[in-house]
């Protein structure tokens, strides 16, 4: 029987049992992820279940990122409770100064390999599709059950194949590819499906770019979005992962729900307008929009690639008067590398603020929330009303080059305009 990649992954985890879209299965997972916004809720459910000790703590990873560094006593208490529980149970814990934003950290630290199944208490667990893994977000009850039993229920999804062809133009990154996909699907067009990213252009996408693409699959309603593992994947994992894995892809005659085609030869830097990630146009169509704040960072767009792109825009330039710029490296590793490369100095000299790794303002928590009437260009993944602060603020989503160019110009522009004026 011909199978899609997601069917192969699920079937292998069920001991070879054949599955088809629509089947409901209890899916064993390889890794269970909790953060400081979900772990404590799962702990309460575990207590209600009568589970005092986890049967396999080696599969559980906890990361302090949403409320770290703590902004108030409540946040500090949540962080302490999670850390105390992690130490008591013997599960991995990445705290301040050690880790960073969860999805970047798990990929960097080798927890994710192709074909693995990761259940996470965060909707952007789909980011692990960058490495060909089936990562999906679950609620608190499912998270607790996964910690207690190693399984969660999952409807076998169908597959929407996304074919990227052509060659990327200047200043086009993974962020633009997924925004182009969202322009076609909208925010619900892939509900109940997975997005499988293929095509001749994929080989030229780094893992950082693939993270940016997979991270926003959930914004189309998808269970996850992944790239079949290839040589780029193998090279990235060579010094990271110590678990065996094999590269797999959908069978050539597998059945797909539908196909989307994105021609990179004609794709320019993209922009998602308020208040939906699928409200997408070319960035050049918003060049009169004044910007109050620029925010570079999040679980998939605070990578070293993003910071290098932003620094290239900022080098020798200044943040415009009346505009704020916040740069958030996604992890300790990224922060250290950016420091060694002199990127952080570029940002500071330009008048930007460099933050510790945190989810912070991305979810409207702290370190850069917006006031009513303000406008922000962010490399984050959601721009729903009130996502980054006031419901009367406007959030535009873009890649790091577009965001940094907006910081210099004080308005949204295509970064090619800034370069041509140099």
Image: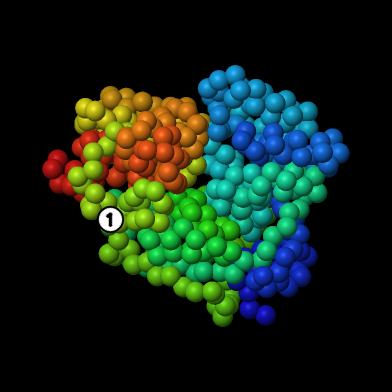
- The image quarter containing residue 335 is top left
In this rendering, the answer to whether 68 lies above or below 37 is: above
In this picture, residue 310 sits left or right of residue 223: left
* Relative image position of residue 72 (x, y in whole percent): 55, 20
The location of residue 179, given as percent across then percent down, is 39, 56
Q: Under tag 1, what secondary structure? A: strand
User: Which residue is painted at 82% across and 38% down in the image?
Assistant: 48
Q: Is residue 131 left or right of residue 10?
A: left
Observer-nearest of 302 and 414: 414
- Percent x, y for residue 68? 55, 27
Q: Position of residue 295 (x, y in %)?
A: 37, 36
In which quadrant of the rendered image does the C terminus lie?
A: top left
Q: How many marks?
A: 1
User: Counting other residues with Cα less than 10 Å from the Cα at mark 1, is it few (<14), some (14-19), or many (20 or more)?
Assistant: some
| Residue found at x 28% / y 25% | 351
| Residue sticking out furthest to the left | 421
> Horizontally, is 165 left or right of 9 in the view?
left
Q: Is residue 17 visible?
A: yes
Which residue shows up at 45% across the image and 50% down it?
212
Figure check: 141 above or below 256: above
Per the image, the residue denoted by label 1 is: 282
Residue drawn where x is 29% and y is 65% of the image: 265
* Placement of 400 over or under 17, stated as above or below: above
């Amino acid at each position: 029987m011909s199978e899609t990649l997601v069917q192969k992954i699920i079937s292998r985890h069920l001991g070879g049992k054949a599955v088809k879209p629509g089947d409901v299965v209890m899916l064993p997972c390889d890794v269970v992820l909790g953060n400081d916004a979900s772990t404590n809720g799962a702990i309460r459910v575990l207590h209600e279940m009568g589970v005092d000790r986890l049967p396999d703590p080696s599969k559980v990873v906890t990361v302090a990122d949403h409320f770290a560094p703590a902004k108030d006593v409540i946040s500090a208490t949540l962080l302490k409770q999670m850390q105390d529980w992690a130490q008591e149970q013997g599960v991995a814990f990445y705290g301040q100064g050690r880790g960073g934003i969860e999805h970047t950290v798990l990929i960097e630290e080798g927890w994710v390999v192709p074909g693995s199944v990761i259940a996470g208490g965060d909707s952007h667990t789909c980011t692990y599709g960058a490495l060909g893994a089936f990562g999906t977000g679950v609620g608190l009850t499912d998270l607790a059950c996964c910690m207690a039993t190693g399984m969660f229920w999952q409807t076998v999804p169908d597959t929407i194949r996304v074919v990227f062809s052509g060659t990327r133009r200047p200043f086009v990154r993974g962020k633009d590819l997924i925004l182009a996909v969202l322009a076609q699907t909208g925010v619900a067009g892939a509900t109940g499906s997975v997005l499988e990213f293929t095509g001749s252009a994929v080989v030229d996408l780094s893992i950082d770019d693939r993270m940016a693409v997979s991270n926003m699959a959930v914004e189309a309603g998808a269970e996850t979005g992944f790239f079949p593992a290839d040589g780029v994947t193998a090279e990235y994992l060579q010094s990271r992962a110590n678990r065996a894995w094999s590269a797999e892809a959908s069978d050539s005659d597998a059945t797909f729900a539908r196909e989307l085609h994105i021609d990179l030869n004609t794709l320019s830097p993209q922009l998602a307008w308020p208040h939906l990630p699928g409200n997408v146009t070319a960035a050049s169509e918003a060049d009169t929009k004044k910007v109050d704040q620029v925010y570079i960072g999040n679980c998939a767009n605070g990578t070293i690639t993003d910071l290098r792109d932003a620094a290239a825009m900022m080098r020798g330039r200044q943040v415009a008067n009346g505009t704020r710029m916040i740069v958030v490296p996604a992890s300790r590793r990224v922060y250290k590398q950016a420091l060694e490369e002199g990127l952080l100095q570029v940002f500071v000299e330009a008048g930007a603020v460099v933050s510790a790794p945190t989810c912070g303002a991305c979810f409207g928590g702290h370190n850069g929330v917006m006031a009513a009437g303000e406008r922000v260009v962010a490399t984050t993944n959601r721009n729903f009303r009130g996502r980054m602060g006031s419901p009367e603020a406007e959030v535009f989503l873009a890649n790091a080059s577009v965001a940094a160019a907006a910081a210099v110009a004080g308005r949204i522009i295509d970064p090619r305009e800034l370069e041509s004026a140099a």
